[in-house]
Image (spheres, grey):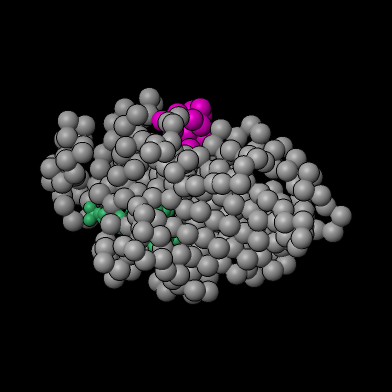
Amino acid sequence: MKAGIIGASGYGGLELIRLLHGHSEVESLDLFTSSDEGIIFSHKYAHLMNIHDTPLHRIDLDHLASLDVVFTSTPSGVSSKLLPSLIGKGPRLIDLSGDFRLPEKEYEQWYKKEAAPVDALKQSVYGLTEWNRAQIKEAALVANPGCYPTAVLLSLLPAVKNKLIDASSLIIDAKSGVSGAGNKPSQLTHFSETNENLSIYKVNQHQHIPEIEQGLEFFSIKQQPITFSTHLVPMTRGILSAAYAPLSEGVTEKQLIECYKETYQDEPFVRFSSHGDKLGTNQVYGSNYCDIQLHLDPRTNRVTIVSVIDNLVKGAAGQAIQNMNLQFGFNEKTGLDVVPLFI
Ligand SMILES: NC(=O)C1=CN([C@@H]2O[C@H](COP(=O)(O)OP(=O)(O)OC[C@H]3O[C@@H](n4cnc5c(N)ncnc54)[C@H](OP(=O)(O)O)[C@@H]3O)[C@@H](O)[C@H]2O)C=CC1
Ligand SMILES: CC(=O)N[C@@H](CCC(=O)OP(=O)(O)O)C(=O)O
């Protein structure tokens, strides 16, 4: 199949290239740019020497329409303008940005940008693979989930859906490596302000709050507002999410564990473990895994539900490729069956 990436030179784009390079079904990969047309990609990124020595293409709708799948890995506000004219023109579209994840009003409120046209929004399908396979399979346009919502929703949905925890006042505390902010330098990500520093940011204003609430509601039950805090950690990759909630009355820890085991037992990329008291982002580094653990504190009857992902893989490019595999009828593990880097 013929694949294309718009925003190839960003972090999500580079990760798509890395993983698609090892994908047995992808015959050609065209890279598109808004700023560097004609540049040989490996001259810009030497780690791709002898791997991607082709020039970057101008974003051209006819060229894009000739492909089987197009990934957009662009800043918010870009794919909402680009993709509507490509819907139904040939390629399956998989958008890594937030442009097609929320309804119009919520998007404009939280992203402070103009939303995608309503007709296009109606055709987009939320790409949380494990929870939305039937719809993703048929979708012309997949809205790939945000990095934090992937970690949070995968870890909370079994408990919330089955009403095993009291989700009326969920508190979720999440931490991310700096690559989550993309390759464009900013004061938040400047070395001298991230190194030796741990910070909380976008308190009660993070754009993933409505996405998480919507996901909990869409796949489980009517959701009360959540408290969701994001922190920047001086590391490159990885997200750790920890959620705190009381067990529902009469529910035991054993029931909760059984529910998670059952929900994810056949999933190739979600690993639930009921033992151990330690979970780190390095156990999923570079891989498409989401690892989940839970711990009940019998003194408070509150459960701590923890998950880790690599924000650039399961939180972005890996999940996008998993969705592509699903859409084209390939084994979901194709191109993604790698052992985490760990050290
Ligand atoms: N980083 C992460 O962990 C995750 C990111 N996301 C989302 O995925 C998207 C991509 O993220 P990321 O790769 O980190 O971002 P980057 O900022 O690293 O890269 C974005 C790329 O988009 C291209 N671009 C910029 N402006 C335009 C434009 N006007 N038209 C077309 N292309 C443009 C640029 O390449 P060029 O100049 O060559 O056109 C740029 O390299 C974002 O929306 C982000 O929120 C989602 C989940 C996780
Ligand atoms: C560390 C860091 O800054 N992470 C980014 C994640 C961005 C993202 O994934 O945003 P979209 O919803 O636009 O896809 C953030 O917290 O905003």
Residue 282 image-quadrant placement: top left
The spot of residue 91 in percent (x, y) is: 39, 41
Q: Is residue 25 magenta?
A: no
Count every numbered label the image shows and give the total.
Answer: 0
The spot of residue 111 in percent (x, y) is: 44, 70
Q: Residue at x 69, y 38 (%)?
A: 261
Residue 235 image-quadrant placement: bottom left
Q: What residue occupies the far right of the structure in this picture?
A: 250
Left or right side of 164 for 39: left
Q: Is residue 319 above or below residue 193?
A: above
Q: Residue at x 35, y 34 (%)?
A: 20
Left or right side of 322 for 244: right
Q: Residue at x 45, y 70 (%)?
A: 200
Nearer-the-camera pick, 66 or 148 = 148
Residue 30 visible in image: yes
Left or right side of 27 for 88: right
Q: Quadrant of ligand 1?
A: bottom left
Residue 111 visible in image: no
Q: Residue at x 55, y 63 (%)?
A: 173
Q: Quadrant of the C terminus?
A: top left
| Residue bounds of the magenta highlight | 321-336
The spot of residue 106 in percent (x, y) is: 53, 70
Left or right side of 90 for 279: right
Q: Quadrant of the N terminus?
A: top left
Q: Is residue 23 above or below residue 97?
A: above
Q: Is residue 167 above or below residue 26?
A: below
Nearer-the-camera pick, 298 or 66 = 298
Q: Is residue 334 magenta?
A: yes
